[in-house]
Amino acid sequence: MPDRLLTSAAAVLTASDPTPDHVLLGRFVADADDVAFELLVRRHSDLVWKVCRGILREDHHAAEDAFQATFLALARGSRSAGLTSGHDGTVGGWLFRVARHAALKARNRAAARPTYPLPGALPGRDSPPDESAAAGELAATVAEEVDRLAPRFRDPVLLCFYAGHTHSEAAARLGWPIGTVASRLARAKDRLRARLARRGVLFGVSASVILVPQSASAVHLGIVRACVRTATGRAVASEPVRLLTEGVLAAMTTAKLKWTAAFVALLIGVASAGTVWAVGGGSEPPTAAKAPDPPKTDTPPAAARAEPDKKPAGPVLQKVAGPLERALSQRNLAAVARAIQAYHLDHGYLPTDILGKNGKPLLSWRVAILPYMEQKALYRMFKLDEPWDSENNKKWASTLVKIYLAGVENRLDSDGYGLTYVKRFTGPNTLHIPGSQVDLRNIPDGRANTLLLAEVGDPVPWTKPTDPVVEPADPAKDPITLKTPPVWKGPYSNVVNVAFATGEAASLKTNLTAIDFIVPSLVLWNDGRVLPERGELIAAPSVEQDVADTTELMLAARKMADQLVKLCEEEAKLRAELARLRKAPADTATPLADHLIGIDAQIRDLRHQVRQLKEEVDKSKK
């Protein structure tokens, strides 16, 4: 019997296997156990299919692509995502999130493609096209709100509403008492009802969209088998599936960085009330503005903001960037670079400024990539046919998007515009040629040698279409020699933070201008000059300074740990007091466990890094 048949037969025979998800995934990661992975696919196929088919009701083929991309992402990204930690709800929750992202990306790509109905084609039998599209949009809204639930509420919703399990089956899967499943499911419904009501959606109606049309409610066995063959390397993924997989893995990698980035931001005190932390995925081509939804941001409009937030415009005094400042800038630049790459993946070219009918720039490329940073709602607030300083757009230009901040600039200028140092070099032979669509795949000097972004110049309004321009001295005879050197000075006196076209962020030396060709070669994409080794460009602290910085960080980490313990204790006491006042059962341990799961993931990552460093030290001694 062929191996593939043995694998399928083994998975079918073990369909009722109680082995937890994380154990099966561990077998696949450690031993390339195809049977374990196929069992995981079969176990979660209904959940993933309902998410994909619910959002993509009108496009069965796109739903299949999103379904396969979800499990291919599991096969490729399970190790880095930390899904073998032991919490059995983790795998299902991760698959749900990936499936949602994959379905949305597939829907947006399908919407961007022109469609031509075949002669005599009949409308879908399940529902009229308009009704089907509306139901898909509603399903996406419900999935988005379900994804926002805390894991202790989201897991029973996924198992009971999406996967179709009974309370007792869900309790067995989660290792909870049946009463706990029922109570948390009820509380999850209350939260969903309230959140959806704020978006103008009735919960009774929205709950029904989880159920796809009866003719499409079950995933075909052939799709499952094709998915397993692709994910386990026995077949090659199609181009749409491969692109979707790359897109959702990039989005999930970004989401994983949120906890660490927030920790860094809190340590250096750059997080302030009324700012937006936008480091996510999501996708929607920047075409025309849609009907406004309430933006998901804690930042109030400029009119509602206190006057002290406004500070004088203009440059700030440079300061020395310590390790935390460098880390924060690098994380922010890498997040912006990932959003740019996601935009490029959907459109085939790098984002450009949003232009008016006369070809004049109206809004910055920083606005165009908002949908790829989990800021789709904020993006919809802008009128894309109006300039950045119009009455409407000015209101939203005062919103502070944190990954556009370096942490040292004035938050707002005197006119109320949010400021940023994050810019791109623009001009002939750069990655951003005005009026051209640049393909990131065609860079003669290589992506690793070409800058995509940099924190340079004075801070500017983040919605304004302005970037440093580099011009050749003689475009006809010598397009490589520049009229003036590129600006190579930003918020910090000791580093210039950049992101390369690969998406990698780094802190480079400020004295690179001492050698005439280095900075121009980083900015230009086809000058052909050989750059020094990357290590010679990086601004690395001395050994003594590194030791001092590490000591300071350890003290800060201990203080943070003490604060975390105190806050967890206070949260537990308040929950117990609230339960007493409401005369309801208390559940103070689970929220603390949620915190510990995140901390445990960080500890495992650090332990792995320490082990690698020890090995490198041992090799260096030999």
Image (cartoon, rainbow, N blue to C red):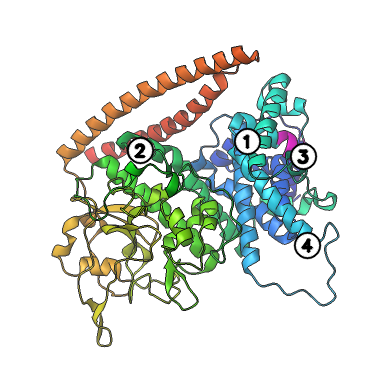
Q: Nearer the viewer, mark 1 or mark 3?
A: 3
> Badge 2: how crowded within 10 Å, few (<14), some, or many (20+)?
some
Q: Is residue 223 visible?
A: yes
Q: Which residue is mark 1?
A: 24
Mark 1 crowd level (few <14, some 14–19, many ≥20, 10 Å Cα) = some
Image mark for residue 264: 2
Disc 3 versus disc 4: nearer the observer: 3
Secondary structure found at label 3:
helix
Question: In the rendered view, would you say 343 is above or below 149?
Answer: below
Q: Main secondary structure of the magenta part?
A: helix
Q: Amino acid at mark 2?
A: Val
Q: Which residues are magenta?
A: 159-164
SS assignment at label 2: helix
Identify the disc placed on residue 129. 4
Residue 291 in the image: state x and y as whole percent: 61, 57
Q: Secondary structure at mark 1?
A: helix
The residue carrying mark 3 is 204
Separation of disc 2 and disc 3 at Cα? 41 Å
Q: Is residue 316 above or below residue 264?
A: below
